[in-house]
Amino acid sequence: MQITFDLTLTPQEIAEIAQIIGCPTGNVPAALGDYGKAALREYLAMMRGQKALKRGTDIHEYRLFLLVETVFAGHIPDEQTISKIFQTTATESRGLLRSIISKYQYLLRDAIDQTLKDVLEGATAEAVTGPFLVTMNSVNVIEELNKKLAAIDGTLPSIAKKRGSVATYEILKSSYDHLCTQLGATPVAYVP
């Protein structure tokens, strides 16, 4: 079903929204279409009695779940992105993300796995034998990678923050190789 409507925004509002959602001002209408689709799905679920949410946290969780499906195209956003959109602190965003990963784990399985696969394929190797480095602002994604490692083999070394870094994590070669195999990721090659 095609639904269209007009929305009046000032140039200042458009610029502000563009900065928050991270797109050029000219792309705001298209980007807002995805947000609108998520919002409309929320309203329709409420009207049909599928999601009669009462608590504010439940509403935020469901909204984020819908945004993962529409705006983020089946990928899990990082905590900074969530903070920008929901106007929450980093701690609140981390908790919100942890909640949807747990509450909607079966519905988000493909999104979680695709996000983990993208992280592995975006790693850099410090040497042929590793370690592999990933820089990210999502503790929850690192936790999900460590859960995968534990499920594969509890004796594999966990992913840990690189000493002296703010958001860079090290994955030892044995763990990296097992994760790539499990998630169907293409391992990165060391480039001297």
Image (cartoon, rainbow, N blue to C red):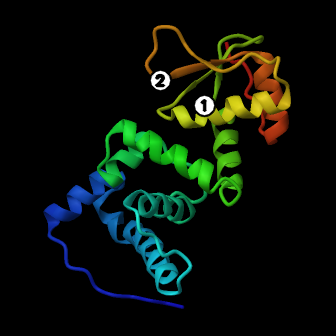
Residue 16, by quadrant, is: bottom left
Q: Quadrant of the C terminus?
A: top right
At which x and y percent is residue 166?
43, 19
Residue type at mark 2: give it.
Ala
Q: Which residue is mark 1?
A: 142
Nearer-the-camera pick, 45 or 191: 45
Q: Is residue 140 above or below residue 33?
A: above
Is residue 1 placed above or below 137 in the rendered structure? below
Q: Residue at x 40, y 46 (%)?
A: 81
Residue 124 appears in which quarter of the rendering?
A: top right
Q: Are marks 1 and 2 in contact (CB under 8 Å)?
A: no
In percent of width and height, residue 125 lies at 67, 18
Q: Residue at x 46, y 61 (%)?
A: 58
Mark seen at residue 167: 2
Residue 62 rendering spot, x and y as whole percentages:
49, 63
- Name the residue at 32% across, 40% down: 89
In primary-sequence order, the first of circles 1 and 2 is 1
Q: Residue furthest front?
A: 54
Looking at the image, is 160 positioned above or below residue 63?
above
Q: Residue at x 42, y 59 (%)?
A: 60
132 up-or-down from 8: above or below: above
- Amino acid at the residue labelled 1: Ile
Give the spatial CA distance, label 1 vs label 2.
Answer: 11 Å
Q: In this rendering, would 5 be left or right of 35?
A: left
Q: In what quadrant of the picture does the N terminus appear?
A: bottom right
